[in-house]
Image (spheres, helix red, strand yellow):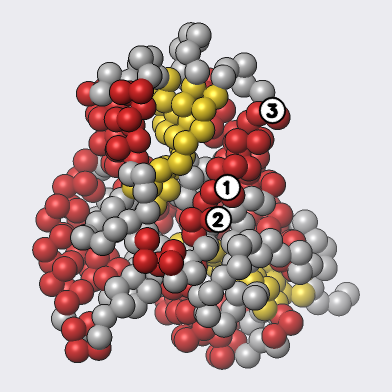
Amino acid sequence: MQDRERVAVLLFNLGGPETLDDVEPFLVNLFSDPDIMDLPPVIGRFLPRLIAKSRAPKSRTYYEAIGGGSPLRSITEDQVRLLGARLTGSDPERDFRVFLAMRYAPPRLSEIRDSLRAFNPQRLVLLPLYPQRSTTTTRSSFREFKESLYEELALPPKSLHVVPAWPDYSPYIAALGETVLKGILALPPNDHPVDILFSAHGIPESRIRKGDPYQKDTERSVAAVGEWLEKEGTGRKMRFHLSYQSRVGPLKWLGPETKKTIGDLAMRHRCVNLVLVPVSFVSDHQETLYEMDITYRDLARASRILHFERAPALNIQESFIAALASLTKDALENRIPVGAPCSCRCGLCPE
């Protein structure tokens, strides 16, 4: 019997502090990333630690409010396990193994190097858990992979399969649409429209001007989910909105801000049924569990929003795991949803 082809699937995510003691080291790693903070070498040696030290106390209060740490690693490890189980046995000619590399928290790429090399894959699929591509996420993860591991694996170019973005990939859109439907169904029935507010993680506008495709990718996701919901039918009139959250620092960020949009909706309409959708987050973490579930829920209550629901994150939803498996197989067949043109120059994304 011929040996099966060994296929490694490498999932990328940013990670998060699992305990309060992990908060400052996580922030140091975050602010040391040149794709986040483009600093001159001299400043870059000490400024990230100063920023992390000053921000850590406030950040710890956020994690205290959601149980003392981020659940992102646990959720993502479940995604790895379920994706591996789904791929195993789906192709009798291939032996699949799924690996996880976090960018700013364990398990880092350096920690999985030995196990990935020991598996000795004949094909490798790079699958970032960022549906919408950005220099701050996708390029950062791909750059680290290329600089630290790519040459060691010595894979022929045709054996590396890169999924750069999947903003309107139909299985993903259907899975995300299901979460929005859950939010809509949780609303009490009434005659008022449902305002569906997609909230994405913001980035500075300057990055968009330099060619970052994140905004266009995000808009594509929102439009595709809107079309999916209209086609599926919800029995409710729907209005769709896009906003951005998690703004930090003095730079001008993509807008409108989520908190401003919630306030504007309350002022513009007498009775608002609001469903808040985490569109750029595939797993629960601080931005969903604290910023959305606590901060924005309190804001909605103070703004006299009639009803507020937060659509659940995709997490380990069966249709989402199926979408990841479908992405993997499409990548192996070179049916890659490239998305918007990218100028990230990571050397891995298809042009």
User: Could you classify mark 2 by the number of other residues whose Cα lies within 10 Å: few (under 14), some (14-19), or many (20 or more)?
Assistant: many
Circle 2: residue type: Asp
> What residue would you read off at disc 3?
232
Nearer the observer: mark 2 or 3; the answer is 2
> What residue would you read off at disc 2?
217
Q: Quadrant of residue 124?
A: bottom right
Q: Please state the horizontal and vertical placement of residue 109, each as a whole percent of the image.
A: 45, 75
> What residue would you read off at disc 1?
221
Q: Nearer the viewer, residue 179 or 270?
A: 270
Circle 1: residue type: Ser
The residue shown at (59%, 79%) is 348
**Does residue 137 appear in this view?**
no
Quarter placement of the N terminus: bottom right
The residue shown at (36%, 23%) is 268
Circle 3: residue type: Glu
Q: Quadrant of residue 104?
A: bottom left
Residue 122's place in the image compared with 14, above or below, is: below
Dots 1, 3 in contact, CB < 8 A:
no
Q: Please state the horizontal and vertical placement of residue 121, each as a whole percent of the image.
A: 66, 79
Q: Please state the horizontal and vertical placement of residue 248, each as a whole percent of the image.
A: 24, 56
The residue shown at (47%, 36%) is 241
